[in-house]
Amino acid sequence: MNLTKRDREIIWHPYTQMKDSSVIGIVKGEEAYLFDEEGNKYIDAVSSWWVNTLGHSNKYIAEKISEQLYTLEHVIFAGFTHPKAVEIAERLLKHLPANQKKIFFSDNGSTAIEVALKMAIQYWENKKIGKNKIIAFRDAYHGDTFGAMSVSGRGVFTQPFNRFLFDVEFIDTPVKLKENDSFRQLEKAVVSGNIAAFIFEPLVLGAGGMIMYEPEILEKMISFCKANHVITIADEVMTGFYRSGNFFATDIIAEKPDIFCLSKGITGGVMAMGVTSCSQEIFDAFLSDDKTKTLYHGHSYTANPIACTAATASMDLYEEPSCYANIKRIEEKHKVFFEKIKNHSSILDIRQKGTIIALELYADEDTSYLNSLRDKAYAFFLNKGIILRPLGNIIYVLPPYCISNDDLDYIYQSIEEFLNTQIKSGKRT
Ligand SMILES: *Cc1c(COP(=O)(O)O)cnc(C)c1O
């Protein structure tokens, strides 16, 4: 029996309606490619759910991990430490803004968010200041655990759980022409005096549909929060590690958030790891002779040495000039395609930041995540040997940084072909 059949008997897949799903058995990865058990080759144009920044089966990372496996595979991280945890913490702090002073490890993006929320809520609790609401963007996605779901926009993903999620002050995402409305909503919520924190995906909202907004409005929002003693939490889980063009999306704004959440690209997509960093002020609020002020949070695999090694090895690669050159190369290629395609009659909107390009397509039915256009597009591109996973009617390309120009051109051509042959042209708004 092949993998597809054996899998179908016993495995439940993420974000998958299992009634009529079929999965492809992948047996090998190499740079931007994946190979299935029948020998078919696919371009991984979505970096395997946005994690694989440095290409599949990266040999440099593999060697470093292999050495670490024979040295120290794991150690409890309460009461103990190890060289790779200290090294990655030191190196992350060099890339993070100067106000970031402490690193807390967990094992995925959602847990990095949980930790950030707990830090923010307990910060006020420890100071005996009763602030208990969080502000978030209406289109946000921060993960799938309950706290992360609570601060995410309510929609298809959260619907069965909405009544269990804590109350959040949602404001409009400050997309073009909505900046003033969104800022006024933030202002109104903040002056109520009950706001503990403001959490946001900086400049690009990923799962919400690759929705983009400008650094100026984010800077204004962070400044306002800071002036009013509201903790700001940057969810850089997707945007970090050059995805949005700079090392961190918030690098281009002067006003720096108090807490950062990192994951996905942190290990080059090789191992599961989450990091929450914070300012000295946040950390200090937990220092006390009173043990109830401790942050009682931890995971069995906290700061796993193999994951930390995948992160330090990835950091070596990120710090090479050739990595940045690749980011700029992809960015330039995306821009050329953007200019070429932007007036196509099937496109409602087109957006680009860093290595991400997203096309919102005209759909003559519901434009939600459940749109049937999604399945049609997914099948079309898979058939061409390209893995693209549209978010509803939004097709996006978010490739590993080692992808070749030829492969990018092939993806762009295939998108054009899809638009020309598979989509009705629509009303432009
Ligand atoms: C993917 C993602 C998360 C959740 O990370 P997981 O590792 O999937 O739990 C959180 N925030 C953002 C912005 C993400 O893109």
Image (tube, grey):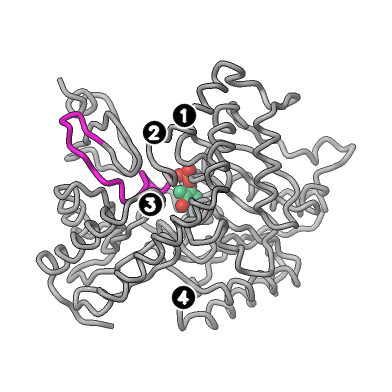
User: Could you tell which of marks 1 and 3 lies nearer the N-terminus?
Assistant: 1
- The quadrant of the picture occupied by the C terminus is bottom left
Q: Which residue is mark 3?
A: 157
Numbered marks: total: 4
Q: Which residue is mark 2?
A: 57
Q: Position of residue 247 (x, y in %)?
A: 56, 56
Mark 4 vs mark 2: in front: 2
Q: CA distance from mark 4 to mark 1?
A: 41 Å
Q: Hey, what amino acid is under mark 1?
A: Ala
Mark 3 vs mark 4: in front: 4
Q: Which residue is mark 1?
A: 62
User: Is 41 included in the stretch rendered in magenta?
Assistant: yes
Residue 167 appearing in the image: no
Mark 1 vs mark 3: in front: 1
The circle on residue 342 is none
Q: Secondary structure at mark 4?
A: loop
Q: Secondary structure at mark 1?
A: helix
Q: Secondary structure at mark 2?
A: loop
The part of the image, by quadrant, that contains residue 331 is bottom left
Q: Mark 2 packing: few (<14 Cα in 10 Å), some, or many (20+)?
A: some
User: Could you tell which of marks 3 and 2 lies nearer the N-terminus?
Assistant: 2
Q: Hey, what amino acid is under mark 4?
A: Val
Residue situated furthest right in the rendering: 289
Q: Hey, what amino acid is under mark 2?
A: Ser
Mark 3 vs mark 2: in front: 2
Q: Disc 2, disc 1: CB below 8 Å?
A: yes
User: Could you tell which of marks 4 and 2 lies nearer the N-terminus?
Assistant: 2
The circle on residue 175 is 4
Pick the front one: 266 or 262: 266
Q: Hey, what amino acid is under mark 3?
A: Phe
The part of the image, by quadrant, that contains residue 88 is top right
